[in-house]
Amino acid sequence: MNENVQSSEAILEELERTKWSRVAKNLLKDWRLYVMLIPLMTFMFFFRYLPIYGLVQGFKESKGGATNVLDAKWVGFDNLKKLFDLSITSEYGRNFWRAFRNTFVNSMYGLFFGFPIPIFLALLFSEIKNGAYRSFLQIFTYLPHFLSVVVTSSIITLWCSPASTSGAAAGMLTTLFEKLHWVEKGQAILETPKFFRPIFQIAGIWEGSGYGSIVYFAAILAISPANYEAAKIDGATKLQQIRYVTLPGMAPTLSIMLILRIGQILNIGFERVMCLYTAQTYETADVISTFVQRNSGAGGAQGGDQAVGVIADLFNSIIAMCLVLGANAISRRVSSTSLF
């Protein structure tokens, strides 16, 4: 027994003594992989970690005349109190919670209506046996993702444009809405608050659903054909094969993508909102990212308080982190699949 204990202690001592030499050996062995990490780590440092320094401004006075953030006066949580002040005289509080509500509502619409569409497309692609025809449809649906948000938003704007006095015809969607008597003749759809959310969701689905189906299509291809053969032998129809074979096989991928999507609930597409919204649609279109943008820059891009914009963005990030952690914990407990 004593010999075994002494032998174990000798092995542990040897492992401890050669720890760093083994680490160096592994680094030298896989040095190419570590070199490939350098650009990513550089990007993360300059564009993810270094900007954290600017969060200090959210707890300082932004209109005190100080040119350096560190020289400004500490105000503690005063800027946070401005966001939670819902009194009539508090413009920041009312605008922030309107933006928070719109961000959450638009994101939930995107989750309920936009999240299933790529899954449905992947299921359709997997059932197409003609490879050339399937490739054509996939490229056709992927294409909008590779266009600039400005281009796709411009197309949506043209579809929603009213007839002009110079004789230009109304856009496709405007004409359809006029025939359905949803809008009056000559009314601008994008300047009507109640139409912004559906148009925004349609634009997002059109732009991202095809590209988003790639992950799900890959998950379907990873399912063993033997499972489908066994289901056919048992007399399963095509819908039953999808229900009992395809969807369970995609479950881990669906869980991970859902967790990531929940983490983006309060990080709605900033560029598309900026391209589509107008002052008339702030009621339903203004989101946290546009609220932060209006209060950013030197003294605020539109006369706002820069410190309030910083603290609003920090609050948004903390809520998003809590959503990711919560969704990950629930997924790990329910399905034994989690992001971390």
Image (cartoon, rainbow, N blue to C red):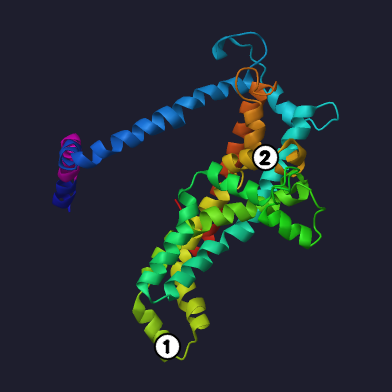
Secondary structure mostly seen in magenta is helix
Q: Which residue is mark 2?
A: 287
Badge 2 density bin: few <14, some 14–19, many ≥20, Cα 10 Å? many
Q: Secondary structure at mark 1?
A: helix
Earlier-in-chain disc, 2 versus 1: 1
Does residue 124 appear anywhere in the picture? Answer: yes
Which is nearer the eye, 20 or 88?
A: 88
Does residue 107 appear anywhere in the picture? Answer: no
Q: Is residue 12 magenta?
A: yes
Q: Is residue 4 magenta?
A: no
| Residue type marked 2 | Val
Q: Residue furthest front?
A: 167
The vertical placement of 112 against 78, above or below, is below
Distance between the alpha carbons at the discs numbered 2 and 1: 49 Å
Which is nearer the eye, 330 or 68?
A: 68
| Residue type marked 1 | Lys
Residue at the (65%, 16%) spot, across then down: 62
Which is nearer the eye, 171 or 24?
A: 171
